[in-house]
């Protein structure tokens, strides 16, 4: 409604007093720095004042819009201040009812029905790896199709099995949230008649990626075959797999970087992609491999996996104080040709890092930040990075032990938390029943 005040006139109001705009809207002026919009209205025979915000943060036009909305509520028989308080409370509840909270509630509710207690940890690990970073802290009511697709699309052609399982878990969380009154409307993660219109069936998707990766289920068989290959190249590749390290980091590795007593490999910043020093906890399997190639007292600068001559620390290799300048690291092509000889040109050396990440998400309860630290991935979010200054070395050590056990097959897997074949079947059954 039109009023008595004008935008220019309001700017000039500095004298203390109450200035009416009509319809109960007033500007209360205490001084030039304190000016507040107030709507005066009648409720139950009593005069009441409702604050609409301070000027100039709330302009004259905005104050009129707020006053009009309040008057409409009054005409409908409501008290605008009570309605505002209820809306504020509802928004506060919505902020607490996040996707993460809904997921944790579902996992807790289903825990009693799962035959294996690890299933909850596996659900949580998958969601922590993919869903939580995208919309875990968003009100579950606000998770829509666009948000779900943003998470699924990058995975759908790279790891379709993982992506399909993730979709089912997101759908289950959103269904449970609706059943609990936390959201309304259709489920944006529903497949039939919805996402099926946007994505091809996962079972028909052939994985495609920049660095093709070996499926994590095939890791033990691959490592068994790799053990039959002779030479420095197979040893370097095996070590790279066991440590989830980049090929270049392993090929340039020197004995001076390895603390054999502490079982830690420290990669200097100058050799890291992110330019930051990275410590790698070495599993028992990784340490056994190093002991097998280390002989005597190698020079600190000697390469662990040299590309020419004898092994850096092996018999006849450079000793402490010896000249190591003639050594050359293995070339990346050496490892590529190794895979070709093994008739595995369908995978890439760098892809084993993706294999590790997918295995960790599917088969372990380790949080995403621990897995990302193991991969030496930089955190893009500045706030999250501030909380992740510690390298989580000791938290990563059992993760790498479990990974080594998985790579070596079922003989050692029973002593770890990694999912065994029967457990994976039960996990898939749980996913199916949840969706």
Image (tube, rainbow, N blue to C red):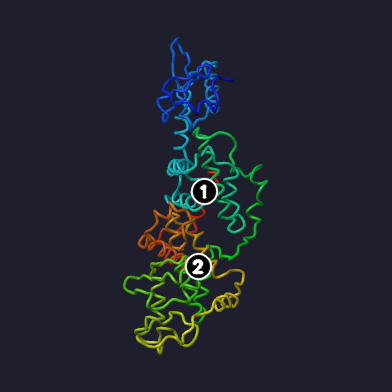
Q: Position of residue 262 (x, y in %)?
A: 32, 70
- The residue under label 1 is 134
- Quadrant including the C terminus: top right
Image quadrant where residue 210 sits: bottom right
Residue 183, above or below 25: below
Residue 411, above or below 289: above
SS category of the residue bearing label 2: helix
- The residue under label 2 is 220
Residue 429, above or below 357: above
* Left or right: residue 258 compared with residue 122: left
Q: Position of residue 431 (x, y in %)?
A: 53, 48
Residue at the farthest right position: 197
Q: Residue at x 57, y 69 (%)?
A: 348
SS category of the residue bearing label 1: helix
Q: Residue at x 56, y 47 (%)?
A: 168
Q: Is the residue marked by circle 2 packed among few (<14), some (14-19), or many (20+) residues within 10 Å?
A: some
Q: Residue at x 47, y 33 (%)?
A: 91
Q: Is the residue marked by circle 1 packed among few (<14), some (14-19), or many (20+) residues within 10 Å?
A: some
């Amino acid at each position: 409604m039109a009023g008595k005040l004008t935008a220019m006139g309001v700017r000039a109001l500095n004298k203390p007093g109450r200035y009416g705009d009509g319809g109960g809207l007033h500007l209360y002026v205490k001084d030039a720095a304190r000016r507040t919009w107030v709507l005066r209205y009648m409720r139950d025979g009593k005069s009441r004042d409702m604050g609409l915000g301070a000027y100039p943060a709330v302009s004259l036009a905005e104050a009129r819009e707020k006053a009009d909305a309040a008057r409409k509520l009054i005409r409908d028989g409501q008290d605008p201040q009570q309605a505002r308080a209820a809306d504020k409370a509802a928004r506060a509840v919505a902020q607490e009812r996040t996707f993460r909270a809904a997921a944790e509630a579902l996992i807790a509710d289903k825990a009693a029905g799962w035959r294996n207690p690890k299933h909850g940890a596996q659900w949580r690990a998958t969601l922590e790896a993919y869903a939580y970073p995208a919309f875990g802290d968003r009100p579950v009511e606000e998770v829509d199709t666009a948000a779900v697709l943003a998470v699924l699309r990058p995975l759908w052609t790279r790891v379709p099995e993982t992506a399909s399982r993730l979709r089912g878990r997101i759908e289950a969380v959103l269904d449970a949230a609706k059943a609990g009154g936390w959201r309304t409307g259709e489920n944006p993660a529903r497949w039939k008649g919805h996402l099926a219109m946007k994505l091809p069936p996962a079972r028909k998707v052939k994985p495609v990626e920049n660095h093709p990766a070996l499926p994590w289920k095939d890791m033990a068989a691959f490592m068994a075959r790799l053990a039959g290959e002779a030479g420095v190249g197979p040893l370097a590749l095996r070590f790279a797999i066991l440590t989830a390290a980049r090929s270049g980091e392993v090929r340039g590795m020197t004995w001076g970087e390895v603390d054999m007593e502490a079982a830690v490999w420290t990669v200097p910043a100058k050799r890291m992609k992110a330019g930051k020093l990275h410590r790698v906890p070495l599993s028992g399997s990784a340490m056994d491999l190093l002991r097998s190639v280390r002989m005597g007292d190698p020079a600190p600068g000697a390469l662990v996996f040299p590309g020419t001559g004898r092994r850096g620390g092996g018999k006849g290799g450079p000793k402490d104080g010896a000249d190591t300048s003639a050594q050359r690291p293995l070339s990346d092509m050496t490892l590529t040709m190794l895979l070709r000889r093994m008739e595995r040109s369908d995978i890439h050396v760098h892809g084993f890092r993706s294999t590790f990440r997918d295995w960790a998400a599917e088969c372990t309860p380790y949080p995403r930040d621990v897995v990302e630290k193991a991969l030496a991935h930089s955190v893009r979010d500045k706030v999250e990075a501030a909380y992740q200054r510690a390298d989580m070395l000791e938290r990563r050590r059992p993760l790498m032990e479990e990974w080594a056990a998985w790579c070596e097959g079922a003989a050692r897997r029973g002593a770890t938390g990694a999912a065994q074949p029967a457990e994976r079947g039960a996990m898939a059954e749980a996913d199916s029943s949840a969706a």
